[in-house]
Image (cartoon, rainbow, N blue to C red):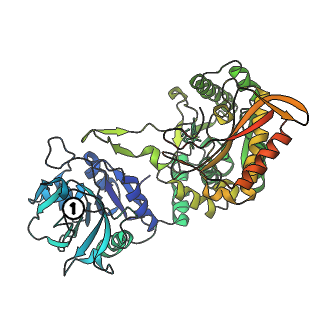
C-alpha cells in the first residue's frame, strides 16, 4: 500500500535508534510517513507521493569508508529536506561543506544543550525562544557549511548546531527534535512539515479506514474470500473489521481455542463479535489436541515449537472446509515490515522477517492481505476506536501466541491451566477494578511447578506458588516492574489463596527487563 491520496514524508534511515520515533512524530501531526533504507530512497520517492524528506541520524561518521550514503540526486528533487544529526552531516558533505570529528573529548555532546539562535534562524524556529533546550548526541560536527547556507544556532561546544538554505528548502539540525528532551522539538517539526513543506494533516483514522477499505476491495476483488486467524487482540480484531467492511461475509475468521487461553477468553471473543459485527466466525475447539501434544513436555523452546506446529495443522484443517478462500488475512504492523539499517553494519540492510500466523508454511500459496502493514500500534488503536471496537479490545493487554503455556513453567496439564486461569483472573480483575491497568503494559499470573509447605486453619498444606507479574513498558523491548499498592497486593494474595485451593503462596516478581524478560518462558 502506498500513500496514494496523502502527500507524506519519506524518512531515510541512516541507522538511528530513533527512526520509528521520527516516523511516529510525523504521523502524530496527521501526515503519512514511510521509512526506507538509503539504497532504496530514490526508488521509494518514485513509487510514492512525497512532499518532504527527512534524513535521520546514524551511528557512523560520514567521512568513514563504507559509511551509509545516498544518491546525491535526492538533493536535486526540489523537495524540502530536514537533515538530523548524521542526516545533517551527510548533506553538508554532499554539498561541499566539511564535517570533522570533535577535536577534544569535551567537544562531543551527549545529552541536554542550550541552543542559542542566530539573528535570522530561519523558518523552522518560528515561535521558538532563544535559548532553547535541545538533545544532542554526536561526536562529529559541521566545521564549515556549503555555500548558500546560514547558521540557525549554536551551543557551547557546537558552533553550527543548526543551519538552513532558504532557497533550496534544506534544513539541518545537529540535535534531535524527535526526542521529547528537545523542548521545542514538536514546534520545529511542525514548522518543517506545515510551514517549510506546506503539507496537510490528512492522515486521520477516518481517511485511513476509507482508503484501506477501498484498497482491500481492489486486492480481493468481487469474488475473493479471506481467512483470518482471530485472537481477539487489537491487531487481528481491527484487521478483521476492516476486511469485513470491505468484503462482508466473504471473510471467514477462525478462532482457535487451544486450551491455553485466559478465563472467559473464548466466550468473550465470541460474544463480542456476535454482538458488534456480522462476522462469519468459526471457533475451533482444539484443546485436546494441544494439551495432548504438550503432555510431558517441559522444555520451553520445545513447547513453543509444538504449539506453533499444532496451530498450523489446526488452521489448515479448518481451511479445508473453506476451499474458496485464496487469501490469508493478517494483522501485521508497520514495525514488522520496516527495513532497518543494521545498527553497526554500515550501508548493509536487514529486513525483519514478517510475523505470520503461527508460521504458516509457504506451500499454502495463499496471498496475504495485511491491512495494517503501514500502521503503528497507536494508529491501529485509533482506527479501532473509530470503527466502534469497544475499550475491552482496544486496550487489551498483549497476550502471547503460546498463551498460558509460557506462564506455566514445566509441564502443562489441564489442571495447571485451570489453576493459573483462576489466579490470573483474580489478579487481573482486581487490577482493573482499581483502574490501574491503564498505566500497565501487562499484568498477569505465573504458575511455578514446585510445591511449598504452608498452614491453613490447623492443617499443613503443600501446594503451588503463584507469581504476580506487572510491568510498565512502551514497546516491550524494555520494561520496568510496576509498583502496585500494598492493599491491592494483600487483597489479591488473600483471594488467590482462599479461592484457589491448589495454591498456598503468592509472590511478586520485581525484575525489570533486562535482565528478566516479561514472560517467564
Ligand atoms: P518477553 O517475554 O520476550 O516478551 O519480554 C515481550 C513481549 O512479547 C510477548 N510475547 C509474545 N507474543 N508470541 C507473541 O505473539 C510469542 O511467542 C510471544 N512471546 C512473548 C510478551 O507477552 C510481551 O508483551
In the displayed structure image, the side of residue 510 where residue 83 appears, left or right: left
Answer above or below: position of 473 versus 416. below
In the displayed structure image, the side of residue 157 where residue 325 appears, left or right: right
Q: Position of residue 444 (x, y in %)?
A: 68, 44
In percent of the image, x 62 and y 23: which residue is there?
306
* Disc 1 residue crowd, few under 14, some 14–19, many 20+, Cα 10 Å: few
- According to the picture, the residue beneath numbered tag 1 turns out to be 77
Answer above or below: position of 323 versus 37. above
Q: Quadrant of ligand 1?
A: top right
In percent of the image, x 37 and y 44: which residue is there?
339
Count of labels shown?
Answer: 1
Which residue reaches farthest right?
Answer: 458
Can residue 42 be seen at all in this image of the molecule?
Answer: yes
In the displayed structure image, the side of residue 323 where residue 153 appears, left or right: left
Foreground pick, 148 / 296: 296
In percent of the image, x 54 and y 31: which residue is there?
359
Which residue reaches farthest top?
Answer: 296
Q: Position of residue 34 (x, y in %)?
A: 38, 55
Asked which secondary structure carries label 1, the reply is loop
Foreground pick, 148 / 115: 115
Which image quarter: residue 143?
A: bottom left
Which image quarter: residue 364?
A: top right
Answer above or below: position of 13 versus 325. below
Q: Position of residue 325 (x, y in %)?
A: 62, 37
Which image quarter: residue 163?
A: bottom left
Foreground pick, 263 / 273: 263
Can residue 270 be seen at all in this image of the molecule?
Answer: no
Amino acid at each position: 500500500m502506498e500513500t496514494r491520496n496523502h502527500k507524506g514524508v519519506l524518512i531515510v534511515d541512516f541507522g538511528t535508534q530513533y527512526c520509528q520515533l521520527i516516523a511516529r512524530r510525523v504521523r502524530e501531526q496527521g501526515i503519512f510517513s514511510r521509512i526506507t533504507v538509503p539504497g532504496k530512497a530514490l526508488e521509494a520517492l518514485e513509487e510514492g507521493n512525497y512532499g518532504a524528506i527527512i534524513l535521520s541520524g546514524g551511528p557512523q561518521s560520514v567521512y568513514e569508508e563504507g559509511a551509509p550514503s545516498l544518491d546525491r540526486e535526492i538533493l536535486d528533487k526540489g523537495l524540502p529536506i530536514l537533515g538530523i544529526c548524521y542526516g545533517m552531516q551527510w548533506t553538508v558533505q554532499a554539498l561541499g561543506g566539511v564535517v570533522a570529528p570533535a577535536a577534544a573529548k569535551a567537544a562531543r555532546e551527549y545529552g541536554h544543550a542550550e541552543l542559542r539562535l542566530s539573528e535570522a534562524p530561519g523558518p523552522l524556529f518560528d515561535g521558538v525562544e532563544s535559548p532553547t533546550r535541545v538533545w544532542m548526541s554526536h561526536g562529529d560536527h559541521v566545521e564549515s557549511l556549503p555555500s548558500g547556507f546560514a547558521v540557525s544556532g549554536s551551543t557551547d561546544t557546537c558552533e553550527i548546531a543548526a543551519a538552513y538554505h532558504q532557497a533550496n528548502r534544506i534544513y539541518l539540525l545537529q540535535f534531535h527534535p524527535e526526542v521529547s528532551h528537545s523542548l521545542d522539538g514538536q514546534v520545529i517539526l511542525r514548522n518543517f512539515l506545515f510551514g517549510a513543506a506546506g503539507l496537510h494533516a490528512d492522515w486521520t483514522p477516518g481517511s485511513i479506514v476509507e482508503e484501506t477499505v477501498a484498497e482491500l476491495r481492489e486486492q480481493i476483488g468481487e469474488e475473493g474470500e479471506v481467512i483470518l486467524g482471530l485472537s481477539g487482540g487489537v491487531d487481528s480484531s481491527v484487521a478483521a473489521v476492516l476486511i469485513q467492511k470491505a468484503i462482508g461475509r466473504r471473510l471467514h475468521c477462525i478462532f482457535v481455542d487451544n486450551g491455553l487461553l485466559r478465563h472467559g477468553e473464548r466466550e468473550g471473543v465470541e460474544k463480542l463479535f456476535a454482538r458488534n459485527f456480522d462476522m462469519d466466525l468459526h471457533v475451533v475447539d482444539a484443546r485436546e489436541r494441544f494439551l495432548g501434544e504438550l503432555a510431558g513436555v517441559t522444555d520451553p523452546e520445545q513447547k513453543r515449537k509444538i504449539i506453533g506446529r499444532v496451530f498450523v495443522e489446526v488452521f489448515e484443517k479448518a481451511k479445508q472446509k473453506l476451499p474458496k478462500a485464496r487469501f490469508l488475512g493478517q494483522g501485521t504492523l508497520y514495525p514488522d515490515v520496516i527495513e532497518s539499517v543494521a545498527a553497526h553494519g554500515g550501508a548493509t540492510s536487514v529486513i525483519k522477517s514478517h510475523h505470520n500466523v503461527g508460521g504458516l508454511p509457504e506451500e499454502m500459496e495463499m496471498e496475504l492481505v495485511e491491512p495494517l502493514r503501514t500502521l503503528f500500534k497507536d494508529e491501529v488503536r485509533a482506527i479501532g476506536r473509530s470503527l466502534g471496537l469497544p475499550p475491552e479490545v482496544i486496550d487489551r493487554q498483549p497476550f502471547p501466541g503460546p498463551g498460558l503455556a509460557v506462564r506455566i513453567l514445566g509441564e502443562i496439564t489441564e489442571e495447571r491451566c485451570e489453576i493459573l486461569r483462576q489466579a490470573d483472573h483474580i489478579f487481573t480483575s482486581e487490577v482493573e477494578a482499581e483502574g490501574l491497568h491503564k498505566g500497565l503494559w501487562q499484568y498477569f499470573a505465573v504458575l511455578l511447578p514446585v510445591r511449598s509447605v504452608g498452614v491453613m486453619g490447623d492443617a499443613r498444606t503443600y501446594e503451588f506458588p503463584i507469581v504476580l507479574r506487572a510491568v510498565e513498558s512502551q514497546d516491550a523491548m524494555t520494561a520496568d516492574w510496576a509498583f502496585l499498592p500494598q492493599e491491592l497486593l494483600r487483597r489479591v494474595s488473600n483471594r488467590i489463596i482462599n479461592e484457589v485451593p491448589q495454591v498456598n503462596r503468592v509472590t511478586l516478581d520485581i525484575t525489570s527487563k533486562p535482565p528478566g524478560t516479561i514472560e517467564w518462558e
